[in-house]
Image: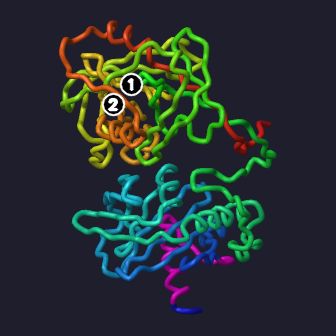
Amino acid sequence: MPRKLLLACSLQVAIASSAIAAGPFGSIHVGNWIGGAFSDDSTGAFSHCAATTSYASGVSLVVGQNAANAWLLSFASPDFHLNKGETLPIDVTFDGQAGARLFATANSNIMLTAILPPNVARAFQRASLMVAQAGKTTLQFNLTSTGPLLNVIATCVTRVKAQGLNSAGDFAKLAAPKSASASDAPNTTGAPKTSKTISKSGTGFVISASGHIVTNHHVVDGCTDIRGNLSGQPATELRVVSSDARNDLALLQGPTSSFKDFARIRDRSIRSGDSVVAIGYPFHGLLTSDFTVTTGIVSSLSGILNDTRYLQISAAVQPGNSGGPLFDTNGLIVGVVTGKLDAVTMVQATGSIPENINFAIKTGAIRDFLDNSVVPYETAEPKGELKTPEIADKARAYTLLITCTGGKQPVEAKR
C-alpha cells in the first residue's frame, strides 16, 4: 500500500473514536482527497465513509459522514500535543464571509474531530478557502474539490447502507451527478422522490418615491413570480432590480402608484441599548394576515463572530420577518431584519437554548447597496420620539408582505 494511502487510512480509522475501525473498503479519490468506507471492527458493521488530504503546514484534514448521516471534520498533525477526550473551540471562516465556531474533541494526542452542523457543512462544501483558528494558531486550507468530494462521500454512505460493504467500489464513479448535498440526509425510506414548486414569504418595505422595495436576498432567491401587498390591500407584481447575496439584500420595484409613502433611513449610528421596533409578516398563512409588531433593544453592534455588518437585537423575530424594517423610536430605519440564531445548532454546540438572539443588517450596508443600485432614498435626523403604535401606523403605508414562487425542487414523497 502506498505511503500516502496508508497515512490516509490511519487518519480515517481514527475518526471513528468510539470504536476500532477497519478499512478502507472500496475507494474515494477526488483531487488530492483519498479514502473509502470503514467498518466497526468489534461488530463488523458499517461505520463511516471518509477521505483525507495533507497540506504544506503539516496538518491533514479528514472529512467524513457516519452511518447516522452526521458530517465530521477532523484536523490531524504529528505536531499536535492533545489530551485524549479534551474539547477545544475552533473558529472557522469560509471565503472570508460565513463563519462558525466548532467544538472539536481529541480522538488522540494528534487528532481533533468536530461534528459539522448542516449550515456549516453547506458552507464547507461551497467554499474555496477555509481559515481555522484555535487559540493563537491560525491555519488556511484550500478547499478545491470539496464540493464533488462531499457528493462522493454521501454516495458512499448511501450505497453501503443500502447494499453493504461488499458493494464497495470506486465511489467517485458511482456518484450520480446530483448526489445528496452536505445538508441533505440520503433517502433511506425507499419512497420515490417527487417535486414541488418553491413557495415562500417574507417582508419588505418601500424605500423610495419610485416604488423601490428593500428585502432580503434569501426571501426572493430562486423565485420567478414575486408579489407584494400592503396589509389589507391586493397583491401587485414586483420585479427584481438588483441583488447582493453576500449582504443578503435584494431590491425590488412595483408600480409607483401603489404606494403613498416610503421609509426614511436614520442618518446617524444607533447605540447598544437603544430601543428598536421590528415589523413583519411571520408565519404567513398560520398567524394573523396583518403584520406583527415586536419591540426590544440593540443588544450588540456586531453579529456572529464580530461581523460588523449586523446588529444583534432582542426584538422577537420569526420565519417571515426576514427583509422587514427595523425602526428606532423615531420611526426611522436602522436595519433590515435578516434572521435569528439557529437554536438547534446552538443546542448541539453548547447544550443551551439561545433566547432573543436575532440579527439585522445595518444601515451602512443598506445605503451602500442602494447607492450602487442608484436609488434615491432619503435620510432623516432622529428627533421627536414616537410611541410604538404610532410607528406601526406610519409603517402600514410602506411595509409589505412579500410572496414568491419559483422553479421546482426535489422532495421525498410522503408514504
- Judge by depth and name the residue closer to the eye, 10 or 312: 312
Q: Which residue is mark 2?
A: 335
Q: Answer whether labels 2 and 1 touch (C-beta < 8 Å).
A: yes
- Judge by depth and name the residue closer to the eye, 126 or 45: 126
Residue 64 x, y percent position in the rendering: 54, 65
Tell me how far mark 2 sits from mark 1, CA to CA.
6 Å
Residue extent of the magenta highlight: 4-27
Looking at the rendered structure, the secondary structure element under dot 1 is strand
What amino acid does circle 2 point to? Gly
**Residue drawn 70% across and 43% down?**
409
**Residue drawn 31% across and 10% down?**
388
Marked residue nearer the N-terminal end (2 or 1): 1
**Residue drawn 34% across and 41% down?**
368
User: Is 23 contained in the magenta span?
Assistant: yes
Q: Which residue is mark 1?
A: 325
Q: Residue furthest bottom?
A: 2
Q: Residues within 10 Å of mark 1 (few under 14, many from 20)?
A: many
Q: Is residue 214 above or below residue 157?
A: above
Q: Residues within 10 Å of mark 2 (few under 14, many from 20)?
A: many
